[in-house]
Amino acid sequence: MRKLYVLLAALFLKSITAHAQTGVKWQAKWIEPADTTNGPERAAQYFRKTFKADQKPVSATLYITCHGLYEAQLNGKRVGDAYFTPGWTEYKKRLQYQQYDVTSLLTQGNNTINVTVGDGWYRGNFGFNAARDRYGKHLGLLCQLEVKYKNGKTAIFTTDNDWQSASGPIRMSEINAGETIDARVQPTNWSAVTTANYGYDLLLPTQGTLVTRHETFKPIKVITTPKGEKVLDFGQNLVGWVIVKARGTAGTKISIKHAEVLDKDGNFYTENLRAAKATATYILAGNGEETFEPHFTYFGFRYIQVDGYPGAINPDDFTAVALYSNMAPTGTFECSNPMINQLQHNIQWGQKGNFLDVPTDCPQRDERLGWTGDAQVFFRTAAYNYDVKRFFTKWMADVAVSQRADGAIPHVVPDILNGSGGSAGWADVATIIPWNMYLVYGDKALLATQYPTMVNWIGFMTKNSTNNLWNKGNHYGDWLSYHSPNDDGSDAITDKYEIAQCFYAYSTQLVINAAKVLGKTEDVARYQQLLNDIKAAYNKEYVTGGGRLMSNTQTAYVLALQFDMLPEDRRAQAAKYLVDNIKRYNNHLTTGFLGTPYLCHVLTRFGYTDVAYQLLLQPTYPGWLYPIKMGATTVWERWDGIKADGTFQSSRMNSFNHYAYGAIGDWMYRTIAGIDTDPDQPGYKHIIIKPHPGGDMTYCKASFKTQHGDIKVEWHNENGKFSMSVTVPENTTATISVPDNTGANYTVHEVKAGQYQY
Ligand code: RAM
């Protein structure tokens, strides 16, 4: 059976490759600069070629990819609006190329194509175990321009031996370190390129969502810090860079450093960036007003420190621009509590900043990796806020190809940690995202594509289990859960193998769900038997005779309840233990990465929505609103990134833009607003509307753009009266449950598309 899945996975890969070749028939040669090292700084390379078009083309298409990151120009005009192309994939197995309609950029006669290629992920120094040349030693370029003339003739211009390369103004570019641009240097020492034979087998057309420019920000404050640093505050922690205008003499060097926060004294704070220098350096050519911005790096920041700027700093000369994958917005959420609205804002900005071609844990320090655990906990929230179908289709294809032969999924994808993986709650990305994508988008084909990877992941856990107990391996566990500041024994540490057993069951359940959808009846029976065994082993090992769990933590109860680990007659009591635990912590959550996403869902399911609201609205640490009280504009990695006295948590791991805890967004949409899909008619074909009023909210207004159209819910709960309006899009049906003002009783309406008032 396993062999069959490996075969299926191989066929799937082949089909991707075949697909790649239907888009373009490659004739181009890979070219590399003659000086492949590009000097000690590893300057970006400029490639060029001038070619002759017999007439003005009636159509022209450029196909292009590279080893590194590229920006292309035709006759001095930028090609396309995407950045960080060709995107980041498992480069040794899959490399995207882009296709651009460049008809309007070409003319009759001579045309020049210029392409700049920087190190990027391909061979730059990035990731927390800093290393260069992860995918290859040489920058390279592959492009093919296909033109059609009015007379029906066609011509193809490709990268080949006739191209030239040189270094130019971009003296250094790296994901973490930043970029240095010396405007005095123009490419002059052009020399012939060499060609290389990498073939075309790994190439595929853009599968994901390319990065483009989005919001811009002007400084809201110019600050001179107590240390005397010149700092600009853009008012929002964002990901991208700052466009700088300056006038000065040739050789003037401006340095722009980036930080997410100021320290408690108001000084510029970069310790939490660890080894990431995150600095843009601009050297003026001295010819009037000059404008600078980087190309092949990005920064996570709210503040910049400006050094060496010629003359007085005028905020007008600085514009921050956010760059992220160009996902269409799908969700809006608003309610009567401004703190919750700020939380929604922070969740969305966490998504923008960390959806830069791949889903990253954080965008600022020397890490910025596709951590699988973070992505799975945030997936459902992400899919409410934006259309992430393409974004995750691409990334999950990378998850699939990075799966180890033994079925383990690496901790990060693309896998730059050399195969280390198989951690509970991280590797389960293999099942959790495909299943949830199916719920959100209703696309069976996507589920079928990922099915072999899902099954192989179960195989890994089974192989590493004894008597159906998965009690081997290294696990991150309930990462960053509550630790008491005084080590008084109240730390919420959940046994890692107890957690692993829950995820083993959950992933198996999701394979059963998928097998049912895909009509794989044999698998349904087989995995159902396995699931029964996993749960029996769990109850024997981790549940006391009285129904308490071995780890007496919120996360232990949350996972047991969310994944139906306990026999039905024990669940209500376990939910009560969970609530008791929350009360013991004075209405605070103590959960980390794995317990947090399900905490409020479990409370709602077992009739404790009031407790869920208390947690949501809890203004003191640990809780979602504490960072907001401390001025956060994105979601923090830790519940106490900045402590109440203004000091920081350990600089070794303290990101102020980590989306994982933003997973509460799912509960806000699904439970407060009450918008969900029926798993039996996924993709919002049959919509479930069931709001849960509470938390003293007087109104909630949310919308969600499905593939069928917009769902809208607006409820008011004032003066003892609950009222609600709902829009149900065309070609769908909905079950609308209308609560009374306490949320205790519902009246249910089965409806078709239309607008409804209750
Ligand atoms: C940290 C990452 C990420 C987490 C892992 C386990 O380094 O930032 O959030 O998933 O560790």
Image (cartoon, helix red, strand yellow):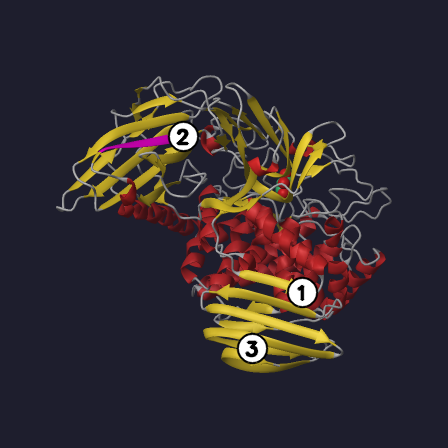
Quarter of the view holding residue 569: bottom right
Labelled disc at residue 117? 2
Q: Is residue 393 left or right of residue 617?
A: left
Image coordinates for residue 313, horizontal then vertical, percent: 62, 31
Labelled disc at residue 335? 1
Identified at 49% across, 28% down, the residue is 173
Give the foreground label among 1 and 3.
1
Q: Amino acid at mark 1?
A: Cys
Disc 1 versus disc 2: distance between alpha carbons? Answer: 46 Å
Q: Is residue 391 above or below residue 743?
A: above
Q: Is residue 113 magenta?
A: yes
Quick check: is the Cβ at mark 3 less than 8 Å away from ligand 1?
no
Q: Is residue 556 left or right of residue 400?
A: right
Give the SS element for disc 3.
Answer: strand
Give the SS element for disc 2.
Answer: strand
On the image, numbered disc 3 is attached to which residue?
735
Farthest residue, direction left: 151
Q: Residues within 10 Å of mark 2 (few under 14, many from 20)?
A: many
Identified at 62% across, 68% down, the residue is 701
Q: Is residue 582 above or below residue 125?
A: below
Disc 2 versus disc 3: distance between alpha carbons? Answer: 53 Å
